[in-house]
Image (cartoon, grey):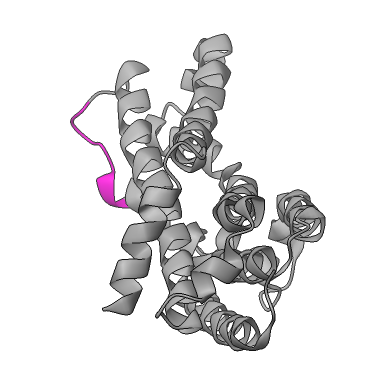
Amino acid sequence: MMIGKALSSDFLKIRKKGVWFLVFLGSVGLLAMQALNFGLRYDYMIDHYKTDLWLGLIREIFSFVPIALYLGCTLIASLIANVEHQNNSWKQLLALPISRVSVFTAKVLLAFIAMGVACLILSAGTVILGILLGFGTDNIPYLTILKLSFLPYLGALPMLALQLWMSLTLKNQALPITLGITAAIASMFSASYPEFVPLSWPFLSFVSEVKPELPIGAGIILAFIVYMVGMGHFRRKDVN
């Protein structure tokens, strides 16, 4: 119950803070890149993917999904945390009759929901983009498009949990943002990483020749561990 009240309060706090604009901009920006890519090289792309135009579009979008996820996790976590940091409202918030566990968990859920909305926008936008490009509506691979949006997200959950932990406990956001940008850049080479490296999990979660259960399960488990450790740290730390 306390978590629900804290979450409702957080939804009100992030209005006009740029969180939802970032959610929309990130997904639409990714789609706009591919609209430009196909628009400028339409004949070549159509010929290149003539056996399956929808799959071609999905592959082109997926090549940028891991980096977009890591940047999104970083920026959304920072924006959510800065609502309290910029207003110096941590002491006031934590003085309320609500546990630190509820405060921390509500902000984690808020970030999780925000990223989920971004994934939904990406799914819907992919369908719309394919139709606008003339791929037809008879064989739209809805399930594959949903997998494109959500499976890499599940693989990236540890980064979201880590970013929230760092952003909520550090007023100076330089370290978490630097870490997030570095991870985003490193994710461009994720295809060459071993399976046990977390940076490879968003990529491996969608690659068909690899069983997605392993990176997805590992992502969820590691994210929960990071969440628990972060929550324990948040409970003990003096937040200014």
Decide whether residue 142 is among the magenta residues. Answer: yes
Q: Is residue 188 magenta?
A: no
Whether residue 210 appears in this view of the structure is no
Residue at figure coordinates x 31%, y 60% from the top left: 8
The answer to whether residue 22 is seen in the rendering is: yes
Name the quadrant containing residue 53.
Answer: top left
Quadrant, the C terminus: bottom right
Left or right relative to 3: residue 186: right
Instruction: Report x, y in % for residue 110.
Output: 42, 60
- Residue 59 lies, in percent from the top left, at 51, 41
Q: Position of residue 212 (x, y in %)?
A: 47, 70
Q: Looking at the picture, tell me which residue is in the foreground, 217 or 40.
A: 217
From what the image shows, is residue 234 above or below residue 15? below
Q: Main secondary structure of the magenta part?
A: loop
Q: Nearer the viewer, residue 126 or 210?
A: 126
- At x 43%, y 50%, the residue is 13
Task: Check the picture and name the quadrant holding the N terminus.
Answer: bottom left
Q: Please say if 225 is above or below 21.
A: below
Residue at screen point 44% across, 83% down: 99
The front one of 54 and 240 is: 240
- Position of residue 233 measured from the top left corner of the image (x, y, whole percent): 65, 85
Compared to 32, does 187 lie above or below? Answer: below
Q: How many marks?
A: 0
Classify residue 167 by image quadrant.
bottom right
Q: Identify the residue shown where x is 45% and y is 53%.
A: 115
200 left or right of 228? right
The residue lying furthest to the left in this view is: 138
Magenta residues span: 137-143
Depicted 12 relative to depicted 129: above or below: below
